Amino acid sequence: MALPHAASRLIASGFVFMFCLSAFAAELPTGSPEAQGFSSERLTRIRGVIQHEIDTDRMPGAVVLVARKGVITHADTIGFQDKAAGKPLQRDAIFRAYSMTKPLVSVVTMMLVEEGKLQLADPVSKFFPSMSKMQVLANPADPAGATVPVTRTITVQDLLRHTSGLTYAEFTRYASMKSAYQEVGLFSTETPFKSMMITPQQQIDAFAKAPLLWQPGSTWEYSLSTDLLGRVLEVVARKPLSVLLDEKLIQPLGMKDTSFVIPAAKVSRIAEPLLIEPLTGAPMAPVLDLTKPMGNESGGAGIATTADDYLRFCQMLLNGGSFDGKRYLSRTTIALMTSDQLGPKVATPIQPGELLMGVQGYTFGLGFMVRQGAGLASVPGSEGDYAWAGLGGTFFWVDPKEQLIGILMTQTPGAIRQTYRRMIKQMVYQALE
């Protein structure tokens, strides 16, 4: 099982000296937009569009980074870190990345696969025997919640591609699943992010008791799959998830401001959302407090990071698994992760692109949504570009064909975040020459 989280802090300190040189890792170079195939004039349109959102109290502020061919061609910091306090946003602001934790955990999972410590076909019950005989709702729409046995067990691949049968009670349209998750302690109407507040063992016990929404492997359902994957990694690596991520990815990449707990010395850099939800006029829902440890380290939503830190991660992916002289994954593994992992047999009641941006045209790989073609989607992009985002408003995409990375860091946790993901994609691609 995972080590106690109090011990994780002690173990993590053992890596400080080992990776101290990562703080001096080379920064991505900055170059003129024209040298990388952009129009400077057209890129300036991005600031005007975002400034309008800030002026109309729809967005507090944003950091935007655009890189092409390994060169930062556009970097802009606009608006407020805390608009209510009148505090200007700085480029090194720290953002609650929420689900942009998932790609990090997915990459570390594949690193362990490459080391032969894990296989995508491994059943989750190999690590947690209590999950070997799970039940599935016979009819999700039936409030009674009658169940049938699983036809096969959940695999590591299912966790990576969100075909495990798990869900998010906060987002599901099925009352039966909300009730089931509330009964086992994975959801509460009184306690936001309840699944992150319980211990790792309590989380595993809850997963084992709750019914699945779908038969494993049958349906794409965005879910707590990556949280369960984090628990699997802790068993395989015999260390807490935070330590594993620090050791294998965060520190070597030089992501110096990326962590599950924001240190006291950096708290003044945390970006905050608006106080009022712009589309409803209601008070903004509570956001995660990442200044203190949670009950467990959430592989699905627990990371805080900066735009520049996440750019380093994205550049490693775009480079085919290497960065600054170190290889993290093979190019074949990156290709596998960014290929269609759903195929014709997996149902998609809501497609990944519809969930993330309100657009069609995307399938799902292992940790990312992946564009299937030039058309269908109502935003520009290339076949094979891949992306994900966070509940708090953060968003990134990688376009191998254009050798392009786009990052939007903002704290807009309301439904308006879909609008901003579409906005930044169209504003970046319209500037390409």
Image (cartoon, rainbow, N blue to C red):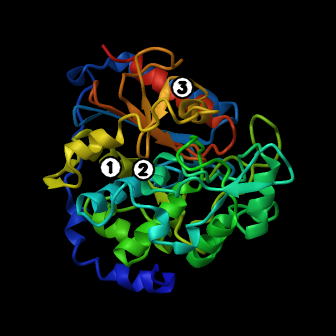
Q: How many residues crowd mark 1 within 10 Å: few (<14), some (14–19), many (20+)?
A: many
Q: Are marks 2 and 3 in contact (CB under 8 Å)?
A: no
Q: Are marks 1 and 3 in contact (CB under 8 Å)?
A: no
In the rendered image, the quadrant that contains the C terminus is: top left
- Determine the CA span between mark 2 and mark 1: 9 Å
Query: Circle 1 sits on which residue?
Result: 313
Ranked by sequence position, the earlier of labels 2 and 3 is: 2
Q: Residue at x 21, y 76 (%)?
A: 18
Identify the disc placed on residue 423: 3
- Could one spot residue 65 in this view of the protein? yes
Side (left or right) of 400 relative to 197: left
Ranked by sequence position, the earlier of labels 1 and 3 is: 1
- Determine the CA span between mark 1 and mark 3: 23 Å
Q: Are marks 2 and 1 in contact (CB under 8 Å)?
A: yes
Above/below status of 235 relative to 146:
below
Q: Nearer the viewer, residue 346 or 297?
A: 346
- Determine the CA span between mark 2 and mark 3: 22 Å
Query: Circle 2 sits on which residue?
Result: 103
Q: Residue at x 42, y 50 (%)?
A: 103
Q: Nearer the viewer, residue 81 or 225?
A: 225
Side (left or right) of 352 relative to 109: right
Q: Amino acid at mark 2?
A: Pro
Above/below status of 207 relative to 278:
below
Identify the disc placed on residue 301: none
Q: Residue at x 44, y 41 (%)?
A: 368
Q: Amino acid at mark 3?
A: Met
Number of marks: 3
Ranked by sequence position, the earlier of labels 2 and 1 is: 2
* Residue 301 in the image, given as x and y percentages of width and height: 55, 57
Mark 2 secondary-structure assignment: helix
